[in-house]
Image: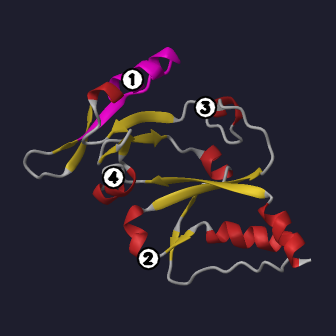
Amino acid sequence: SIIEQFNSFISNLVRVACFTTHPVNKPMWSHYGNLIDGSRTLEHGGICIEYNCGESWRNAGLCPVSYSSDRPSINMIGSDHERLLQLTKAMFFKDPKWGYEDEWRIAAYMEKNAFYPENLEINSRLQFPNCVLSVIFGLNAPDNMIERVGNILNAHGRNVPLKRIVRDSSTQEFVITLI
């Protein structure tokens, strides 16, 4: 019975989207902003997408991560509803040492065997039309990538400002500038 319940429970896949409220956070760029280009990794070479997170995001489940040493537990022999609530709660907890991220998350559950076409833009269960405010390129993002992203946005009729992280010459802090 427990194995049957566990198999039923994992027959769904979980998708988590993570966000921060600090697009110039240096550790965030170091952890998540790398560009992997073939066999090389370019630190601070990736992108950050800036969103306008309105009420529709909250309705979709956007919540701040809780930073706590107390780890939530999941009772695998409890009811399906109880396990789902416990798993959802667990996905919104992190150790306090990660608190500088000021992370927010949306979690979604998808059926394991569902067919999803390659174009997730029309297939995503969560869609927020016209919510992209800008695309922010990392300190070391290559110019050809910036041009390519700009061309893709233009080809789709999206008027999205392109920005870039640069170092302030007097403070050496990261700042965002319009490209």
The residue under the point 45% across, 34% down is 133
Amino acid type shown at disc 4: Trp
The residue under the point 78% across, 51% down is 112
Kindly indicate whether the residue at mark 3 contacts the one at mark 2 (C-beta within 8 angstroms): no
- Secondary structure beneath dot 4 equals helix
Where residue 69 appears, as percent x and y from the top left, is 50, 83
Where residue 144 appears, as percent x and y from the top left, is 31, 25
Q: Range of the magenta residues? A: 146-165
Q: Can residue 110 be seen?
A: yes
Looking at the figure, which quarter contains the C terminus?
Answer: top left
Does the magenta segment cover residue 92?
Answer: no
Q: Of circles 4 and 2, which is in front?
A: 4
CA distance separating discs 3 and 4: 26 Å
Which residue is under mark 4? 29
Does the magenta segment cover residue 152?
Answer: yes
Q: Earlier in the sequence, mark 3 or mark 4?
A: 4
Where residue 102 appears, as percent x and y from the top left, is 43, 62
Q: Of circles 2 and 3, which is in front?
A: 2
Which residue is under mark 3? 129
Judge whether 175 appears above or below 6 on screen: above
Q: Of circles 3 and 1, which is in front?
A: 1
Which residue is under mark 1? 148
* Label 2, residues with CA under 10 Å away: few <14, some 14-19, many ≥20: few
- Secondary structure beneath dot 1 equals helix
Q: Earlier in the sequence, mark 1 or mark 4?
A: 4
CA distance separating discs 4 and 2: 19 Å
